[in-house]
Image (cartoon, rainbow, N blue to C red):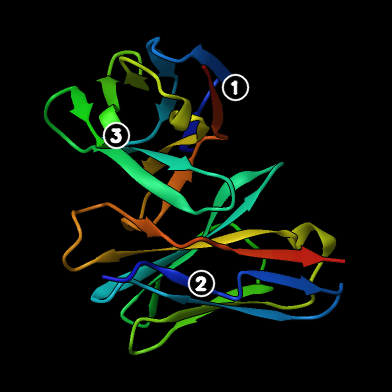
Amino acid sequence: KAGVTQTPRYLIKTRGQQVTLSCSPISGHRSVSWYQQTPGQGLQFLFEYFSETQRNKGNFPGRFSGRQFSNSRSEMNVSTLELGDSALYLCASSGSGAPVYEQYFGPGTRLTVT
Amino acid sequence: AQSVAQPEDQVNVAEGNPLTVKCTYSVSGNPYLFWYVQYPNRGLQFLLKYITGDNLVKGSYGFEAEFNKSQTSFHLKKPSALVSDSALYFCAALGGGSQGNLIFGKGTKLSVKP
């Protein structure tokens, strides 16, 4: 099976713009989680989607949002970008066929806000 | 609040020597614990997990971890380190609400010298 894919891999945006990142989970996986990784804050949970519904949400402002489509692909959107949003954004999938509680991570999208 | 701590930012080991990467946790209820490894410009790779059962958990690439409930620790170990083990290691615990919410430690950089 193909692994988790994320597009784009690299992105440069300007403060105030918005950005959309995409994640395609492993085939058959219905849960997709998003994480933000920064040198200062480490890895932080953003949100989790399961069967097109947000199942859990971390402690991030409303500028961060996501959605999941019927094919389990997920997108996350960040509006009104700030310099502090520069980070590696990782998504992970889990679900049918995977051992319980194991998440499989994509390579990430490196977002740079200037 | 639930948290995971990795007290060492960096661990240096000579090739062939045993290695230990430390992790302590503070979670409510039964802890579900994980170790992930991250290589440069890559996503996280699952190493092992503790859900229940034996306190010594064996995982990928010869790694194992010892769960100690009284010390609330979950240290990662390997009997003989390889240069290729050099990477960033993350300990994580399952947060509340769903299985897609991982709480990560800050990470420990493991450096194995020939």
Mark 2, chain letter? Answer: A
Q: Position of residue B69 (x, y in %)?
A: 27, 19
Residue that lies at the very extreme toward the bottom in this rendered image: A70
Q: Label 1 vs label 2: CA separation?
A: 29 Å
The mark found on residue B61 in the picture is: 3
Q: Position of residue B39 (x, y in %)?
A: 52, 44
- Residue topped by disc 2: A6
Same-chain status of marks 1 and 3: yes
Mark 1, chain letter? Answer: B
Residue at the (40%, 88%) spot, across then down: A69
Marks 1,3: beta carbons within 8 A: no
Q: How busy is the neighbourhood of tag 2: few (under 14 within 10 Å), some, or many (20 plus)?
A: many
For marks 1 and 3, the one nearer the N-term is 1
Q: Label 2 vs label 3: CA separation?
A: 26 Å
Callout 3 amino acid: Tyr
Mark 3, chain letter? Answer: B
Q: Quadrant of residue A16?
A: bottom right
Q: Is residue B80 above or below residue A82?
A: above
Callout 2 amino acid: Gln
- Give the secondary structure at mark 1: strand
| Front in this rendered view, residue B91 or A64 | B91
Residue that lies at the very extreme toward the front in this rendered image: B114
Residue at the (33%, 20%) spot, across then down: B78
